[in-house]
Amino acid sequence: MYEQMELSDLGVSPVLADVSRSAIEELAETLSGVHSVVYAAGSRLDNSFDVFSNNLVGSLRAQQASKLAGVERFVQVTPCASLAAAVGCAHPESVTMADEALRISGLNYTIIRPSAMMIDAAPGLQLASSDVDFQPVRLDDIADLVCEVLDADLAPGSEINVTAGSQTPSSTLSDFLRQPNSVSAGQQPVNLSRS
């Protein structure tokens, strides 16, 4: 488990759980005492039932367990719905439905919505000007942005759309925080675009 060792080196205590098979109560017990949950299992797009299961069912189960466990922060990394439809994802509606469920969950949440993610994309990102900008963002930059979000004092219900660009995750989040509607939950997400 390379990822677990790497996270432990950063002072993070990883918790492994199967959101698709474990009972909600069992997941909640696993999350007992956890401050923040990052749900990124639904960020992969292809034509399998797993996409629907991870995007919607897994997210709903993680949300319910987090609420039951008293988790303080829930960060969801989710692909943009336009990209899901454009690449022929079998269930693009699952992306939107998972986000909608999170909005009404009662959790203190943040949604990070990358235009597209690739391991070998060029470094750098920025806020997206629209949800149809499919310039791939490097996976490491999204991970760094998640860390920045966890350290920031964002308003509950913040939604951040990002795409490829020339900024660091830290400066991208700073740009988001300077937007007038970044402090009010339930507003339309602020988008960042490629320069």
Image (cartoon, rainbow, N blue to C red):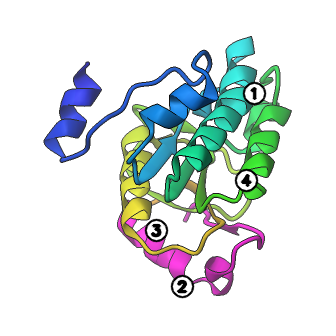
The structure residue drawn at horizontal position 78% and vertical position 47%, both measured from the top left corner, is 101
**Image quadrant for the C terminus?**
bottom right
The answer for how far apart the CA atoms under marks 4 and 2 are is: 26 Å
In the rendered image, which quarter contains the N terminus?
Answer: top left
Name the amino acid type tagged 1. Val
Q: Residue at x 77, y 73 (%)?
A: 187
| Label 1 secondary element | loop
Please name the residue that numbered disc 2 is placed on.
178
> Residue 166 in the image: x percent, y percent?
42, 61
Q: Residues within 10 Å of mark 2 (few under 14, many from 20)?
A: few
Residue corresponding to mark 4:
105
Q: Give the mark nearest the N terminus, 4 or 2.
A: 4
Residue 86, image x, y percentages: 80, 33
- The crowd level at tag 4 (other Cα within 10 Å; few <14, some 14-19, many 20+) is some
Q: Earlier in the sequence, mark 3 or mark 2?
A: 3
Q: Amino acid at mark 3?
A: Thr
Residue range of the region highlighted in magenta in the rendering: 168-195
Please report contact status of discs 1 and 2: CB closer than 8 Å, yes or no. Answer: no
- Disc nearer the start of the sequence (1/2): 1
**Circle 3: element type:** helix
Query: Between tags 3 and 4, which lies in front?
Result: 4
Residue placed under numbered mark 3 in the picture: 172
Residue 140 is one of the magenta-drawn residues: no
Q: Are marks 3 and 1 in contact (CB under 8 Å)?
A: no
Give the residue pinned by disc 1: 87
Is disc 3 surrounded by few (<14), some (14 to 19) or many (20+) residues within 10 Å?
Answer: many
Q: Is residue 177 visible?
A: yes
Mark 3 and 2 residues: CB-CB less than 8 Å, in contact? no
Q: Earlier in the sequence, mark 3 or mark 4?
A: 4
